[in-house]
Amino acid sequence: MMKVLVVLMLVCSVYGVVEKKILPYQQPCLQDVHAALREITASLAETKLEVKYLQAENKELAAKLEDQLKDQQTEVEKLKKQLQGKQVAFSASLVVTGDQTFGPFKGHTPLVFKHVVTNIGNAYNSQTGAFTAPLKGAYHFEWHILGNGGTPTGAVLVKNSKHIFIAYEVQSSRRPSASQGVSLLLEAGDVVFLRQWNRSKVRDSYNHHTTFSGHLLFTM
């Protein structure tokens, strides 16, 4: 459009010089120039509108993208919290320090594992020795028991009030030991703990021979 305007102005100038009569030739040329200017002005106005439209559209798109990003960040945080809620694991030994022997007792006696090395999810209580399932799911437990002085040693895993599996060993000499493991389907609120078998001895020391561990395998 600018090229057209420049050409028109040059034509007007040439006509004016050659003929030495400016007005007869200059008037139609000026009309053409004005027409070109009006067209250019209209085109510029249209271009400005398009630019404003694109700016508004881009601003709206940027706002939508920002909202989507915030929503995604919120979902990520929710997933993180859900994942953290599903992380359950504990491991503990019977005594913190020293060397101690428990029993023999006439009846089955709960064992309280005081030395906690892991308690993700805080489902194990070191004051009572009980693990309380925070979620419905499959859990795996293991326990290792050391005895003392040729006396039987044993501990049974209890779910709520029901005996599940027992680790038990009898040796005529030295220190007997026993280990056991089990996977259980637990409802939220189910309680799992160990009972020392009656008339047995259980020993632990700063070396932490007698241990109780468990973790969530998957939720149901």
Image (cartoon, rainbow, N blue to C red):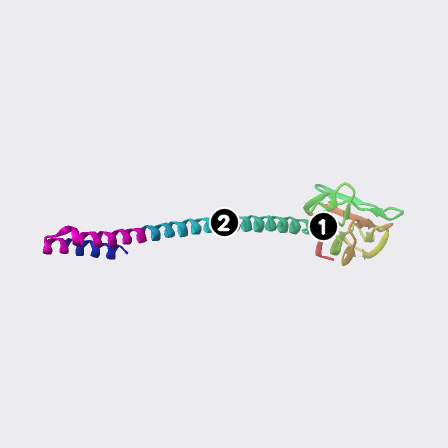
Residue 101 painted magenta: no
Front residue (pair 158, 173): 158
Q: Residues within 10 Å of mark 2 (few under 14, many from 20)?
A: few
Residue at the disc numbered 2? 60
Alpha carbon separation for disc pair 1 and 2: 66 Å
Q: Quadrant of residue 139?
A: bottom right
Would residue 7 appear left or right of 92 to someone viewing this image? left
Residue in view at x 54 percent, y 50 percent:
69
Residue at the disc numbered 1? 209
Q: Secondary structure at mark 1?
A: loop
Q: Which residues are magenta?
A: 14-40
Front residue (pair 202, 218): 218
Residue in view at x 80 percent, y 46 percent:
111
Image position, residue 17 (x, y; %): 11, 53
Q: Residues within 10 Å of mark 1 (few under 14, many from 20)?
A: some
Give the overall secondary structure of the magenta segment: helix
Q: Residue furthest front?
A: 24
Q: Using the rendered image of the protein, determine whether residue 169 is visible from the camera's viewpoint.
A: no
Image position, residue 70 (x, y; %): 56, 48
Quadrant into which the N terminus falls: bottom left
Residue type at mark 1 is His
Q: Secondary structure at mark 2?
A: helix
Residue 25 painted magenta: yes
Tell me if residue 115 comes above or below residue 172 in the rendering. above
Residue in view at x 10 percent, y 55 percent:
19
Would residue 84 appear left or right of 168 to someone viewing this image? left
Residue type at mark 2 is Glu
Q: Earlier in the sequence, mark 1 or mark 2?
A: 2
Would residue 103 appear left or right of 116 to someone viewing this image? right
Front residue (pair 166, 63): 63
Image position, residue 150 (x, y; %): 81, 53
Tell me if residue 137 comes above or below residue 109 in the rendering. below
